[in-house]
Amino acid sequence: MTLTTYDIDLDKNPANFQPLTPLTFLERAASVHPERTAIIHGSLRRSYRDFYARSRRLASALAKCGIGRGDTVSVVLPNTPAMLECHYGVPMAGAVLNTLNTRLDARIIAFSLEHSGAKILITDREFSGIVKAALELSSVKPLVIDYDDPEFSGSGERLGEIEYEDFLADGDPDFSWSLPRDEWDAIALNYTSGTTGDPKGVVYHHRGAYLLAIGNIVIGGMGQHPVYLWTLPMFHCNGWCFPWSLSIVAGTHVCLRAVRAKPMYDAIADHGVTHLCGAPIVMSTLLNAPVAEKRPLPHIVRFFTAAAPPPEAVLAAMKDAGFNVTHLYGLTEVYGPAVVNEWHEEWNGLDSAEYAAKKARQGVRYPVLEALDVLNPETMQPVPADGATLGEVMFRGNVVMKGYLKNPGATAKAFEGGWFHSGDLGVKYPDGYIQLKDRSKDIIISGGENISSIEVEDALYKHPAVQAAAVVAMPDEKWGETPCAFVELKPDEAASAEDLIAWCKQHLASYKCPRTVVFTELPKTSTGKIQKFCLRELARAQP
């Protein structure tokens, strides 16, 4: 490399170069706004001073257990204060936070524990049944810490030798945590939904988490001290990095164990919620709530949604209810949302058809993403910006994952040609906005969760009466999409729709099971390949 005048004797040193990490956001918030409320959970109010101290206690207690750089701490937690503390305390110990989807089945949780080599597992008692089954299946036996949330009124077995608060009590609130050795160090591990076989472990680094957290503040128009309602699961892409974002502006986290209409309206009205994120089902829950559960909103509330673009009728209803909806797009591999349908004021005057067409687009890159394009995956050249030529949506930049844990083949394939290949097919318009047109691998997005049609089909094929099966997405007003199964039975065999749904529930997480089963001869090509595009049309026509 040729040196320029500006390189000579001007080197990186501790005074001018520090690794980027979102952990410093909490340290600053606690220093500048120590008494401001950081967390609301039921009757609990926790200041930034206490939030920071408890996160340091957690880091200290983990360190006393021998947890350090590169170790995995897995958690099975809903949106609670403990989950927020884990987002800081675990990486403060140098470890990697692995947030597990509370809706997964025991086999997948066991796989994740084994694959990540989890040394600690923090689990909420609500999920003790599925976690106990997972621990019995797993060859990895982590130290189990039970979390007793005062807001949980149900029952659940304690699986570990120590409760979360007792574990924290042994930690030092003044624990001297260190910045990561390198901003490229892993901060979090998120497993994909296992759409083709076992899930893949997506590794996030401190630099990407820092940048995406800032990107959220910019895109979300978050000034000082926003109030954020946790409807988006924090186990999903680390809550799109919002656990770290809120500390930048000393905002307030309003925790919510479960998405229910009345608690959401109460939280918005009582705490002055300004922002929330969620899948289309959250909008549906809000809009379809009984009148008795609704409360007048104190101001316009900004709502960020991903998955399929909301129908125009839903957007209009949300606006009338006092919500300003912004559509985002991303994947686990890009820390959650990295694309936004950034709205232009002049588009408000468009006629309904043009307005809806603009709203249907996924949009443009986040400011913290360096490049977004639609490329021909064979030539790696951009497709024409004509809104018609299909290509693959690809990402490049600092908010793209490190890669897939222990899977160099999948990592190399994902980064082929110097871009991250999303697997999503789309088009690009003359103004640079992109729009998805299809999803590869026939993924069904139901309530914000990815469901593999192949996985559901595999379960159906195991039934002794099933000769052939194909599963496609069926539009659903509440969930966005649900699996619809088309089945051919073997000659002289019998099974009802209820039989097959019950069978699937024995082999799959309940949200992956088909809601509708249609018995029919499957349309096939001359080579015997099932024509799923025909089935999608049939699914759309189902009552």
Image (cartoon, helix red, strand yellow):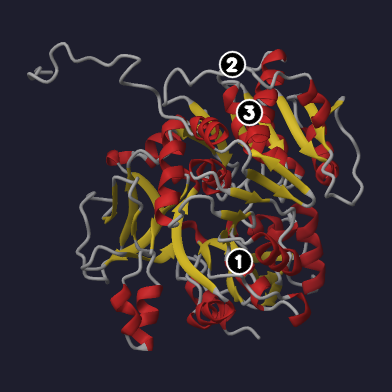
Residue type of the residue flagged with mark 3: Gly
Is 269 in front, or is 311?
Answer: 269
C-alpha gap between disc 2 and disc 3: 12 Å
Q: Which of the numbered marks, if any, corresponds to residue 89?
A: 3
* x and y, in percent, of residue 356 in the image: 40, 80
The image quarter containing residue 464 is bottom right
**The C terminus lies in quadrant:** bottom right
Task: Identify the residue at horizontal 80%, vertical 74% (top origin).
Answer: 496
Q: Nearer the viewer, mark 2 or mark 1?
A: 2
Q: Nearer the viewer, mark 3 or mark 1?
A: 3
Q: Which of the numbered marks, if any, corresponds to residue 537?
A: none
The reply to whether residue 482 is visible in this rendering is no
Q: Label 1's element?
A: strand
Residue type of the residue flagged with mark 1: Val
* x and y, in percent, of residue 219 in the image: 40, 55
Is 341 in front, or is 53?
Answer: 53
Badge 3 crowding class, 10 Å Cα cut-off, few under 14, some 14 to 19, many 20 or more, is: many
Residue tagged 2: 176
The answer to whether the residue labelled 2 contacts the one labelled 3, judged by CB atoms less than 8 Å apart, is: no
Residue tagged 1: 471
- Residue 385 versus residue 255 in the image, above or below: below
